[in-house]
Image: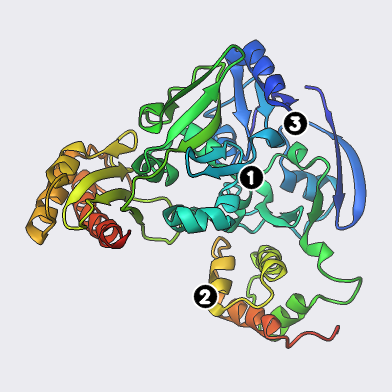
């Protein structure tokens, strides 16, 4: 089966690669680009651990054909930090213990970032709605919500 | 494991319809793919040609006029509908519906046309749009046609689309005055598929005392979104009271043809239809009778 050209930008870096059309965005990010921060968990669009931003909108990368991202800008969890400096959300997650096993964390961070990009001052209810699609099986939701809330309240304005 | 396919990206409607005509025997349209990719991964659907219309910008629009009503291009995402100020003002029930449809991620990529063309009887848009009297417009290489959304759904995951046809637009004709629509689904996990859902559209007469028209649509309670026509008929021309509401809700539950699955038995679904019908008729009626 023929391979097709995919051109896209991931975390600010431009990539061109040839792929089979059946490949999913999560597979290309992890297996071809080595960006394994994005997790592949349920693989059926149910858990959102694979959430990335596609042109600024959160999507489940297990449920998007990679070729559909042609020309797009992708942001994965690796793109949140500025070099070694963690993003405000990442620092808040650390401070609030907003993770346990950590498997849902990349998806949570990216979903929360999408929420804050769109609505920098979400209410608690809006935060809950913003991460509603992301499943955490350690039931750490409360600390995750507190972590996002702290950023929304401006407690992480200074770069760490 | 997804089987290999030939990927064909179409950037205009004409190109899409040409490709569809050529490949109709063994092709599928993909737009958001939020349902299709799950079926392909399970090996339930394995087309030889996959025609990608995600970038078909000419089908990405929301238009409204007071003469013609609402027109939504098929590739409009759920999230665009949810966020539209126009939809919020004129069709608030669609915003309610979208906010409870799957996750933000799915709504960001999944499209209204894809949802309807998937033909899943548990889908949320079907019942709501049928309550709103929606019409769908389809096209093939030769012609366009329109049909009521109610007639678009044929059976489980089966629609009236011919193999060379594309769903291009969803229309909501002008809504009669003093009409309100309510929709709710019952589920265990918020934003999951409905175990049962009900949409009701109630139109009050000029005085706001009697029901002039009623449309009740049941979701996940039959192979397709189903009108509860006998229940509607019981309400038309009547003053609403508790007893009549109970009788109409009972009638709607008799009209339902649910199947049992892992989520609920047939009897439980019928019970849910009764409860939700009463609730949705009351909710839409309370709004409708106050409208000017």
Q: Nearer the viewer, mark 2 or mark 1?
A: 2
Q: Which residue is mark 2?
A: A125
**Residue visible at 26% across and 44% down?**
B216
Q: Indicate the secondary structure of the residue bearing disc 2.
A: helix
Callouts 3 and 1 close, C-beta under 8 Å: no
Q: Chain of mark 2?
A: A
Q: Earlier in the sequence, mark 3 or mark 1?
A: 3
Callouts 2 and 1 close, C-beta under 8 Å: no
Identity of the residue furthest to the left in this view:
B243
Q: Which residue is mark 1?
A: A63
- Residue A136 visible: no
Q: Which residue is mark 3?
A: A21
Q: Chain of mark 1?
A: A
Q: Indicate the secondary structure of the residue bearing disc 1.
A: helix
Residue B248, how many percent across, how many down? 14, 48
What distance separates the C-alpha of mark 2 from that of mark 1? Answer: 27 Å
Q: Earlier in the sequence, mark 2 or mark 1?
A: 1
* In the rendered image, the vertical position of residue B51 relative to residue B107, given as above or below: above
What distance separates the C-alpha of mark 2 from that of mark 3? Answer: 39 Å
């Amino acid at each position: 089966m023929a391979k097709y050209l995919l051109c896209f930008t991931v975390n600010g870096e431009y990539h061109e690669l040839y792929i089979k059309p059946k490949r999913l965005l999560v597979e290309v990010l992890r297996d071809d680009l080595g960006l394994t921060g994005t997790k592949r968990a349920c693989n059926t669009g149910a858990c959102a651990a694979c959430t990335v931003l596609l042109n600024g909108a959160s999507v489940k990368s297990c449920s998007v054909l990679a070729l559909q991202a042609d020309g797009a800008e992708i942001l994965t969890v690796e793109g949140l930090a500025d070099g070694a400096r963690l993003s405000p959300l990442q620092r808040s997650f650390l401070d609030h213990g907003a993770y346990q096993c950590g498997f849902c964390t990349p998806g949570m961070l990216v979903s929360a970032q999408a929420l804050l990009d769109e609505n920098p001052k979400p209410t608690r209810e809006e935060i809950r709605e913003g991460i509603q699609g992301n499943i955490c099986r350690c039931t750490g939701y409360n600390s995750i919500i507190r972590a996002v809330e702290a950023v929304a309240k401006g407690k992480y304005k200074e770069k760490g | 494991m997804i089987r290999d396919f030939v990927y064909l990206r179409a950037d205009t409607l004409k190109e899409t319809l040409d490709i569809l005509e050529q490949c109709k025997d063994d092709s599928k349209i993909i737009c958001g793919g939020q349902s299709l990719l799950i079926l392909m991964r399970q090996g339930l659907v394995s087309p030889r040609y996959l025609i990608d219309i995600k970038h078909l910008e000419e089908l990405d629009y929301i238009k409204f006029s007071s003469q013609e009503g609402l027109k939504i291009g098929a590739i409009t995402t759920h999230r665009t509908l949810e966020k539209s100020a126009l939809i919020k003002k004129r069709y608030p029930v669609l915003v309610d519906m979208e906010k409870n449809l799957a996750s933000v991620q799915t709504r960001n990529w999944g499209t209204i046309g894809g949802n309807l063309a998937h033909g899943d009887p548990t889908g949320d848009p079907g019942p709501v749009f049928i309550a709103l009297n929606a019409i769908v417009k389809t096209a093939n290489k030769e012609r366009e046609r329109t049909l009521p959304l109610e007639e678009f759904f044929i059976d489980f995951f089966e629609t009236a689309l011919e193999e060379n046809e594309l769903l291009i637009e969803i229309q909501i004709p002008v809504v009669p005055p003093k009409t309100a629509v309510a929709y709710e689904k019952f589920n265990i996990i918020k934003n999951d598929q409905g175990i049962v859902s009900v949409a009701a559209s109630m139109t009050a007469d000029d005085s706001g005392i009697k029901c002039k028209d009623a449309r009740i649509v049941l979701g996940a309670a039959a192979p397709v979104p189903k009108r509860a026509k006998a229940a509607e008929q019981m309400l038309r021309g009547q003053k609403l009271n508790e007893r009549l509401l109970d009788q109409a809700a009972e009638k709607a539950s008799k009209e339902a043809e649910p199947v049992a699955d892992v989520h609920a038995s047939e009897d439980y679904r019928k019970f849910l239809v009764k409860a939700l019908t009463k609730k949705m008729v009351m909710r839409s009626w309370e709004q409708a009778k106050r409208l000017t």
